[in-house]
Amino acid sequence: MSEVIAGGVALVTGSSSGIGLATARELSRQGMRVVLTARSAERLEQVRAEMPGPSCVVPADIAAPGAAARAVEAAVSTFGALDVVVANAGVYLGGQLWDSGSEAIARLVATNVNGVMQTVRAALDVMLTKRSGDIVVTGSVSGYQAIPWEPVYSASKHALRAFVDGVRRQLAGTGVRMGEVAPGAVHTDLWSAAGEPGFEDLAGKTSGISPQDVADAVVFMLTRPRHVTVRDLVILPSDQAI
């Protein structure tokens, strides 16, 4: 048995591409009204035009002060509610630490850690008042072990694991659920940018999963009966030995 999410309102950060885009589209297909948030206003408008159902856009850098609160306010003012938040916005930084610029490190922490914390904090102002809601944070399998080729990124995902679990325990008895979806290798546009084969060449292969696979996992988490919380869901390609 699953809970019906049709008719609810969802906020998805980082929804202009990748996992955020796939999740926003899937929630829209499931009948939710969706608030789309990302840095590119132009890209968000393109996404909004292709959404299956009602949506609005909030161009914002989630790392900027007040950005998360504005996105939450837009959900309430536009659609009158906020039922689901998918805190997905994030950036990536790999390579040797000594080759990483201090600005790039600060940017990643501001987006991946503080941006998520501020998004959750703003959402709880609404959800705790009505004593219901769901929050899903996009983590990573690299938050479950130290990955040597991406230590800064891996550290940010470790921080999110601690944050999600700590806040989830604080929320016990409030009617608000919180969990983390933690993907392994996901075929997105970043693969092509890094010189890897494009997703079209890799779709369905066991070396990686698609953004839609992750979106389906998020919907699974959201549609469990209210007495069930999926604390964390690690989703990996079948050939990723990690």
Image (tube, rainbow, N blue to C red):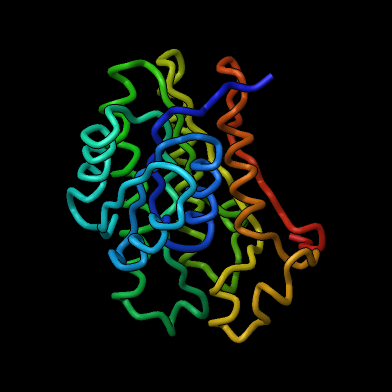
- Residue 235 at what x, y percent from top left? 68, 49
- Horizontal side of 4 relative to 86 (left or right) equals right
- Residue 81 at what x, y percent from top left? 31, 27
Location of the N terminus (image quadrant): top right
How many numbered discs, if any? 0
Residue drawn at the location 21% of the way across and 37% of the way down: 73
Location of the C terminus (image quadrant): bottom right
Vertical placement of 76 versus 46: above or below?
above
Residue farthest to the left? 66
Vertical placement of 101 versus 236: above or below?
below
Residue drawn at the location 46% of the way across and 18% of the way down: 172
Residue drawn at the location 33% of the way across and 53% of the way down: 37
Q: Which corner quadrant of the image does residue 4 belong to? A: top right
- Residue 197 at what x, y percent from top left? 68, 81
Q: Which corner quadrant of the image does residue 205 belong to? A: bottom right
Q: Which one is nearer the viewer's eye here, 108 or 42?
A: 42
Residue drawn at the location 53% of the way across and 56% of the way down: 19
- Residue 209 at what x, y percent from top left? 70, 60
Vertical placement of 40 versus 124: above or below?
below
- Horizontal side of 47 relative to 139 (left or right) equals left
- Horizontal side of 180 relative to 118 (left or right) equals right
Vertical placement of 58 versus 199: above or below?
above
